Amino acid sequence: MAVAAERVSLDLTHVVCKPYIKIPCLVLLTGYPVPDDVSSRTSFVLALLTLSPILLMPAYAVLAVQTRELTIINMWAGQFFSEGLNIVLKRTFKEERPPGGKLHLDGYGFPSSHSQYMGYFGAFLICHLYFRHRFASTGNALLDLSFRLLVYAGITSWVALVAYSRLNLLYHTPHQVAWGLAIGALVGTIHYIVTEHLPYRRPLSVFGRVRAAVLKHPFTNWIQVRDGWAIWPDGGREIEWQHWKDVYQERQASFHLKRTN
């Protein structure tokens, strides 16, 4: 109880962190407060990291609207399904949060919603990067592999840190976080295999036909949804960049021609 009582809230976020020289953590209003010790700095960083699921939702929306990629829209839809499943599980098991967490957060604690969110996010994204996406090659196989492993490690570390923040900030018990991660990772992996991997590997299967029907639907054609990874290993990024470069160089050449004339 004493640990929780020493914590203060990040305004507009309902995230709780350790105090900073008796200055409220008004991060979104007044900028970065000056910490008084290493523990407080760690708690502050974790308090920001724990907001990742909240910040990822608008990122999903922006990417879905900007790219119209079916894979991104599908990943976002699966994220909503995972969140709905979490609500059902919480209301089914009705397990309380740790004692310190009750002081600043309502609702049941099993499984951890943030951990499940990041578990799904990490599992789906890593599956996609492993099975489908190919980064531009550097020409060196060892460097290419090292970069890919670095990306995997970065995603895994992000997921792990958000999960740990739920423990450090007293929102959940260890098993609530562990189960949240496991359930999210399971949902993300299954969702990817059923809706992305199998349709690509077996286009004539029921999974492939459903995906093809979605892409052929008049509504998806009207909003110009596409499946870039079905055509290009990088989802079309390189060919789009090359097209931009060609047009840009043509325009630059025409400007110089007009100037000389």
Image: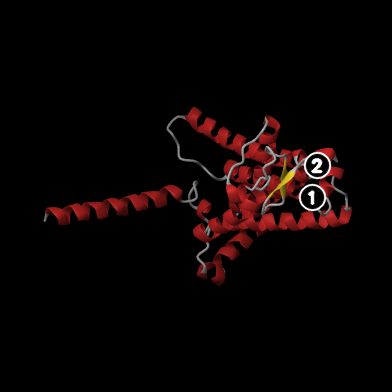
Q: Where residue 199 sits in the image (x, y, percent)?
A: 62, 54
Q: Circle 2 sits on which residue?
A: 4
In the displayed structure, 202 sits above or below 48; it is: below
Total label count? 2
Residue at x-position 67% and y-position 39%: 44
Of helix, strand and loop, which one carries label 1? Answer: loop
Identify which residue, 260 or 137, lies in the foreground. Answer: 260
Determine whether, in the image, residue 219 is placed left or right of residue 178.
left
Pointer 1 local density, CA inside 10 Å: few below 14, some 14–19, many at least 20: some
Residue at the farthest front position: 22
Q: Where residue 163 sits in the image (x, y, percent)?
A: 72, 41
Q: CA distance from mark 1 to mark 2?
A: 8 Å
Q: Which mark is residue 104?
A: 1
Residue at x-position 37% and y-position 49%: 242
Kind of residue at disc 1 = His
Image marks 1 and 2: residues in contact by CB distance under 8 Å = yes
Kind of residue at disc 2 = Ala
Of helix, strand and loop, which one carries label 2? Answer: helix
Is residue 104 among the parts visible in the rendering?
Answer: yes
Quarter of the image for residue 123 reads top right
Quarter of the image for residue 152 reads top right
Identify which residue, 225 or 28, lies in the foreground. Answer: 28
Q: Where residue 192 sits in the image (x, y, percent)?
A: 66, 50
Pointer 2 local density, CA inside 10 Å: few below 14, some 14–19, many at least 20: some
Determine whether, in the image, residue 158 is placed left or right of residue 243.
right
Residue at x-position 63% and y-position 44%: 127
